[in-house]
Amino acid sequence: MSARDNFIDRPATLAQYQAILRRRKWIIIGVPLIATVIAYFVSVRQSPLYQANSTVYIRTTNVVSAFGDVNPYLGDPTRLLNDQSKLATSPEVASRVVKAAGVPGISPGAFLGAAHASAATDADLLNLSISYRNRGDATKLVNTYAEEFSRYKNELDTASVQAALRKVQATIDRLRAHNETGTSTYDDALSTRNRLQAFGSIVANSATVQSLASGAAQIRPRPKRNALIGALLGAFLGIGLAFLYEALDRRVRSEEDIEAVLGVALLGRIPRPTRRLRKTNRLVMLADPQSVHAQTYRRLRTSLEFVNFERRARVIMLTSALPQEGKSTTVANLAIALARAGRSVALVDLDLRRPILHTFFRTGNNDGLTDVVVHRTTLSYALRSIGLPAAGRLAPSPDNGAPLSGSNKNNGHSDVQSVLNLLPAGSIPPAPDEFLENAGIGGVFDDLRSRFDVILVDAPPLLVVGDVMALSLKVDGIVVVTRLGIHQRQLEELARQLHTCRAPVLGFILTGAPHGDSYSYGYGYDTRGYQTTPEPERAVERSE
């Protein structure tokens, strides 16, 4: 099974669906909002439209029951009403209504476009309606519509009966002229005439106006209703787009997927630093060491020591797949956590393209590792020994820049509890990738091994440059820093690159995890145990 097959391609639990909705919340919120605004402004720009309604009663029951043998609808009143609705929208009816109503600017064709006739489902009624731009004209047109249709319908029905009566009467007159009044044919003709006369008296009023419109209701514009409809449709569209975008998005969304592809254990979940820390470029282990966020680095320290118990790796390199994944911030905070736990720690900046560790500790970047390798300075001179106070302000380094120990550990400051040794990158070489293959770097690491318990190395991103490959020959272990949201292909390429590295991979650290996923609830911790000094941090420079 390939690494790609290890991914969960579709959500399977309610929690996963909720996670999708949270990730795509701006689509789910934005689409309905945009649809609502568009629907509202389109509605208010529409010209007004009014609708008036009237009803016509169609006599069907008496006709069918009394004259079923002559009624062409054979006892089906529904068919009769449906045919009457078609008759009501005939051009002849439209011409009569337009002429009788006298509304200026409307033609029979325009009238048919504005008129609507439908049979009621629960009564012998024909519903007539007119939609027109003027309220009074809509009322006048629909009332004229009902009257003219009733008149036209009665005329049609009466005309057919009268034609049948004339035909029967002609038959009777012919039989009388031939002196055939006593025949059965004559009797049948008389019976038919009587039935037609009775039928005619009924159909003469087969359509009567049931109700007339007293006014017209505005049906356009209706911005509130249309805005609500737009919001509902936008909500459905937004949710659909959110899940479509999720289906097309190939970024990794769970730590289980990362663990499955990399094939190494998760060492810790680190939440994203607060905006205040990011803005001031400060470390949480210095600014707020007893916060919930800082506890995650202490757990990370414990996890790292646990997985490293048998390997005994001294020089541990931290790398990431891409820039901006929190690698440098993580390695700096981890180094402080190790130093505060009593370990002798050296923190080395080997990201020769974008060195940043010296900015966290307010030290200079001159006379660093590269200068030691080319024998421009000594390792003891290049190391910055930084006294770590209980919280807040950094203690300055001693004059010679050497590690603090013994009587000078507190450096004249009673609040200094531990020491971290920083080896900055130093002068940036013109070809960093070639420089990292220099054998002198291995010599520097050997010298650091003799002085410190743990050496943490901040290395460049693995997928951006090939520096990590060269460094993997000189370190004892590798820790990968990554975050949720990395693309699936990038994660697979990261796994392939790590597989080619010579040093073992100890595990991975997940950065940018939501605070609820860091398993930090502040249990048993008193945040008042450490008080941050209000003074700004002082620059920590090695004396020249």
Image (cartoon, helix red, strand yellow):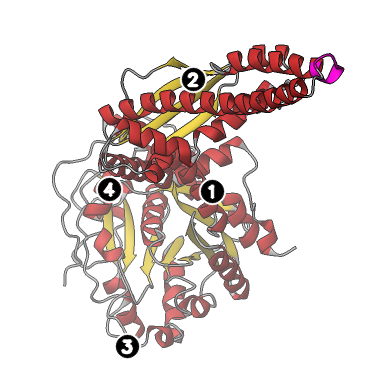
Task: Name the kind of residue labelled 3 in the image.
Answer: Pro
Task: Name the kind of residue labelled 2 in the image.
Answer: Val
Region of the chain picked out in magenta, as a range = 181-186
User: Does the segment drawn in magenta span residue 38?
Assistant: no
462 vs 204: above or below = below
Nearer the observer: mark 4 or 1; the answer is: 1
Q: Is residue 209 left or right of residue 531?
A: right
Between 149 and 45, the one nearer to me in the picture: 149
Give the number of the disc on residue 180. Answer: none
- For label 4, the crowd category at 10 Å Cα-Cα, with few meaning under 14, some 14 to 19 and many 20 or more, is few
Numbered disc 1: secondary structure: helix
Residue that protrudes farthest toward the right in the picture: 184
Q: Earlier in the sequence, mark 4 or mark 1?
A: 1
Which residue is tagged 4?
275
Cβ–Cβ under 8 Å for marks 4 and 1? no
Kindly tell me whether residue 194 is visible in this rendering: yes
Q: Earlier in the sequence, mark 2 or mark 1?
A: 2
